[in-house]
Amino acid sequence: MTMVPAEGGPTSGPTVLRMLLGAQLRRLRESGGVTREGAGWEIRASESKISRMELGRVGFKERDVADLLTLYGVTDEQEREALLKLARDANSPGWWHRYGDVLPTWFQSYLGLEAAAALIRTYEVQFVPGLLQTREYARAVVLLGHGAAGPAELDRRVALRMQRQQLLHREHPPQLWAVVDEAALRRPIGGAEVMRGQLTALIEATKSPNVRLQVIPFAAGGHAAAGGAFTILRFGDQELPDIVYIEQLTSAIYLDKRDDLDYYAVAMERLCVEAEPPERTPEILGRLLEDLYPA
């Protein structure tokens, strides 16, 4: 059976469509007893190109997909057309394409995954999670890394972050489960007024049914994620594995091997246990607001 995501559903988005199509082509190739080398020969490409296609890490030429389907014995017109449409949709640029002038390639991949995720679990130690930042706080964070940028560039970088947040308010939003170190909430990014607005916005965010926010207090001491921030993305389609995203200064790491996923999943579970329960978060934020940034 061909797995094609519903139009506009949680698995839409070019990055994940490539992953879905790649996984489908891999199953068809294996069930047909075709090697990657043989598949590559059929479309005048290398074995490594087939590997990258099956992992969803490159774009798809419709002609190549059609040739591979023929090689794999897919003759049903309806099935062929569904997969060819998937190839066409997978090559469509995401909304973030228009921010290419201020967006590194390695982060574009993340935005595609984030937009398609059904569950986003994230741990932050230095900043408020990007999906929960106010415009003023986001601008202060952008300034830390791009202090030499002009006003127009800063505006575009902030606009990009605000656009990202729209996924939490769409018809089928993902679940966001964020664990934030108390240090990130106490660090005075942008000054008192900015932080007052940010903490107030976080209190409001806890009222959303698709947002769960936990705080790890200083009293917890050392904890499971001492290595730094990370995000685990889970998708609505069971064909897709979870992905761990770890951002660095000039690049990012994407992990999808089972051993890595298990390690980070255990670390995230420990963080959630060591953090204060979600129902206490508004109280904790309110206390920080009153103590650090009283009106």
Image (spheres, rainbow, N blue to C red):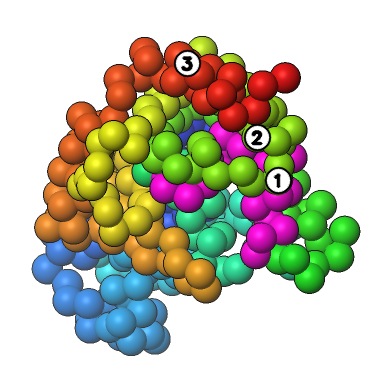
Magenta-colored stretch includes residue 275: no
* Residue beneath disc 3: 282
Q: Is residue 292 visible?
A: yes
**Residue wearing tag 1:** 190
- Spatial CA distance of label 3 from label 2 is 15 Å
- The percent position of residue 168, horizontal first and vertical second, equals 55, 29
Q: What is the span of residues highlighted in magenta in the rendered image?
A: 124-145
Residue shown at the point (30%, 20%) measured from the top left: 277
Q: CA distance from mark 3 to mark 1?
A: 22 Å
Residues at discs 1 and 2 in contact (Cβ within 8 Å):
yes
* Residue for point 32% across, 53% down: 244
Q: Are marks 3 and 2 in contact (CB under 8 Å)?
A: no
Q: How would you rate the neighbour count of disc 3 (Cα within 10 Å): few for under 14, some for 14-19, many for 20 or more?
A: many
Query: Of callouts 3 and 1, which one flags the residue occurring earlier in the amino acid sequence?
Result: 1
**Which secondary structure dominates the residues rendered in magenta?**
helix
Which residue corresponds to the image point at 44% horizontal and 20% vertical from the top-left? 284
**Residue closest to the eye, 51 or 37:** 51
Q: Amino acid at mark 2?
A: Met
Mark 2 closeness class: few <14, some 14–19, many ≥20 residues within 10 Å: many
